[in-house]
Amino acid sequence: MNCLYLLVLALLLVVQTSVTASVTCDTGYEQDRGVCEDEDECEEEGLCGNNAVCYNTIGSYYCQCEQGYRAKLFNFTEDKGGPCKDINECTENKSICGPNAVCDNIPGSYQCSCATGFVASKGQKHFNARQNVTCDETKRSSENITVLDTDKSSASEQQLFNPTLLTFLLVSHWILKIYQ
Ligand SMILES: *[C@@H]1O[C@H](CO)[C@@H](O)[C@H](O)[C@H]1NC(C)=O
Ligand SMILES: *[C@@H]1O[C@H](CO)[C@@H](O)[C@H](O)[C@H]1NC(C)=O
Ligand SMILES: *[C@@H]1O[C@H](CO)[C@@H](O)[C@H](O)[C@H]1NC(C)=O
Ligand SMILES: *[C@@H]1O[C@H](CO)[C@@H](O)[C@H](O)[C@H]1NC(C)=O
């Protein structure tokens, strides 16, 4: 009785194994206990390369580039249409930063800054096209220069009583006395 039970069990095992082995799945599917199920290709790290996002579909997958990057195909795969490369926004649109500005391409983006002698409308050091920044000529009004001059003269007056200057005067006075 016990022997027969074992025999049946062994037979079942053999049948199951042969069934499992005989199942072959199409690409994009993998067998799970004799059944073909969708394979999530995106689980494989680095399948789409750098700066890309992987999307699994039933039986397949596709990749898309992150913002600021572009591949030959918008939807690409490991062996067709990739990889993602940085977009040089500065050369693609020469006026992206507007007039009197300098454009620097950076990975995945770009950066604008005002050219020498120009200042950003909101004082930004760096900006992009979406921020409505204009680069204006640095203003040099006479009034402001006068204010600066007054500042300078009061500063030099203060320097007269500067201890270093005082020491210098004393020492030179002393040296002159020796030579006399
Ligand atoms: C990319 O693939 C998605 C999903 O299949 C689709 O909706 C979209 O239209 C495709 N875009 C292009 C440009 O092929
Ligand atoms: C280039 O950038 C400027 C400033 O952002 C924009 O107004 C213009 O439409 C862009 N040109 C192209 C061809 O994209
Ligand atoms: C930029 O200017 C446009 C047109 O004048 C306006 O619609 C938009 O809201 C402005 N954007 C910002 C961030 O100020
Ligand atoms: C002087 O400079 C200040 C700040 O930079 C500015 O707000 C002001 O308008 C200037 N004065 C004149 C007369 O342009």
Image (tube, rainbow, N blue to C red):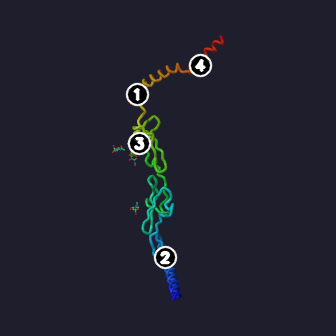
Specify whether tag 3 is near ligand 2 (CB below 8 Å).
Answer: yes
Residue with the mark numbered 1 = 141
Q: Which mark is residue 173?
A: none
Q: Position of residue 33 (x, y in %)?
A: 47, 75
Dot 3 or dot 4: first in sequence order is: 3
Dot 2 or dot 4: first in sequence order is: 2
Disc 1 versus disc 2: nearer the observer: 2
Label 1: how many Cα within 10 Å (few below 14, some 14–19, many 20+): few
Disc 2 versus disc 3: nearer the observer: 2
Label 2: how many Cα within 10 Å (few below 14, some 14–19, many 20+): few
Disc 2 versus disc 4: nearer the observer: 4
Dot 2 or dot 3: first in sequence order is: 2
Residue with the mark numbered 4 = 168
Q: Amino acid at mark 2?
A: Thr
Specify whether tag 1 is near ligand 4 (CB below 8 Å).
Answer: yes
Residue with the mark numbered 2 = 24
User: CA separation, marks 1 and 2?
Assistant: 82 Å
User: CA separation, marks 1 and 4?
Assistant: 38 Å
Residue with the mark numbered 3 = 98
Q: Amino acid at mark 4?
A: Phe
